[in-house]
Amino acid sequence: MVLLVPFDGSSLSKTALERAAEFSEYRGEEVVVLSVIPDSVENALDRDWLDPEETFNIEKIAEKLAEQAADIAPDARFRYEIPDDVSSMASNTTDVVRTIRTVANEEDASIIFIGSENAGRVSTPVTSVGAPVSEDPQYDVHIIRHA
């Protein structure tokens, strides 16, 4: 079993990774860092993965995220996924959530450490991946709300 950390380079995802790395020492479980990178220039610009003058390249974005993750948790295993475009009606958030859940199942995650300032509130913003990921009873979820 592993501790899974969805990681997008944001301050909350960095804090989630720090906490997972600390927790792994207690549990003796491997930390897996997951970056879900939609095939979208707009998404990359919104997340500051890409400067406006740069050419969109998923592998380069993944390398940058892997380096950031390694600076925080050098023993963690990094993987990235490009979400399947299952439906033209699905949002990027829906595709990212589906990918996180799939990887959690593949990796046999015992806990997901997710950085989300919005997860768990009564009304859930459409752009939060925290709440939909936390609905799955297959694993525990640690929500990091403060960086």
Image (cartoon, rainbow, N blue to C red):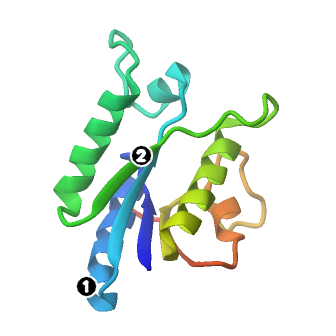
Q: Quadrant of the C terminus?
A: bottom left
Towards the viewer: 50 or 120: 50
Where 70 falls versus 63 (above or below)? below
Q: Amino acid at mark 2?
A: Tyr
Horizontal side of 79 relative to 26 (left or right) equals: right
Q: Residue at x 20, y 66 (%)?
A: 75
In this view, the mark in front (1 or 2):
2
What's the distance in space between the residues labelled 1 and 2, CA to CA?
24 Å
Could you tell me which secondary element the residue under label 1 belongs to?
A: helix
Horizontal side of 69 relative to 97 (left or right) equals: left
Q: Residue at x 38, y 13 (%)?
A: 52
On the image, the x and y values in percent for residue 123 come to 78, 59
On the image, the x and y values in percent for residue 23 come to 33, 82
Count all numbered tags in the image, as a single digit: 2
| Residue 25: assigned label | 1
Horizontal side of 75 relative to 16 (left or right) equals: left
Could you tell me which secondary element the residue under label 2 belongs to?
A: strand
Q: Amino acid at mark 1?
A: Glu
